[in-house]
Amino acid sequence: MKLNEYFNTKKGLGVLSTADGDGQVDAAIYARPHFMEDGTLAFVMRDRLSHHNLQSNPHATYLFKEDGPGYSGKRLFLTKVREEKNTELLKSLRRRKSAYGNGEDRFLVFFNLNKELPLVGEGR
């Protein structure tokens, strides 16, 4: 199953982990990634700690735990390649339409996928 099909069919909880340039870490709940035609993955972000960290350290990990018993899911190792601010593409991708429009800036942050691992097992 392709990764975009996986995320279109599975429900669960996602956590994006980032660190700033000094190595101070953060973890935050994030929705499933958007899969772009150019092969990148994208997340819609507010200007919070995760977004701030990515300005000085482009590396992130997205952990997704599927709903249900056990520990099924994915770990995605990512590198930021670019971002857009308040674009029409971002507005078209947002999943929670009602949560948008309070005047707060939003960023569409694009990542290359470096590695995909299951939630548990397979190190390195």
Image (cartoon, rainbow, N blue to C red):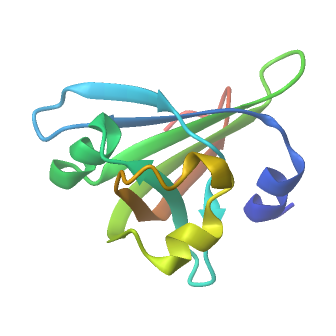
Q: Position of residue 11 (x, y in %)?
A: 83, 38
Relative to 56, is 97 on the left or the right? Answer: right
Q: Residue at x 34, y 56 (%)?
A: 105
Q: Nearer the viewer, residue 87 or 79?
A: 87
Looking at the rendering, which quadrant does residue 1 occupy? Answer: bottom right
Q: Position of residue 28 (x, y in %)?
A: 46, 29
Q: Nearer the viewer, residue 66 or 43?
A: 43
Q: Residue at x 62, y 60 (%)?
A: 94
Q: Position of residue 15 (x, y in %)?
A: 54, 32
User: 105 above or below 70?
Assistant: below
Looking at the rendering, which quadrant does residue 71 occupy? Answer: top right
Farthest residue in the bottom direction? 38
Residue 35 can be seen in this image = no
User: 103 above or below 61?
Assistant: below
Farthest residue in the top direction? 69
User: 55 above or below 68?
Assistant: below
Q: Position of residue 91 (x, y in %)?
A: 55, 69
Q: Residue at x 89, y 21 (%)?
A: 68
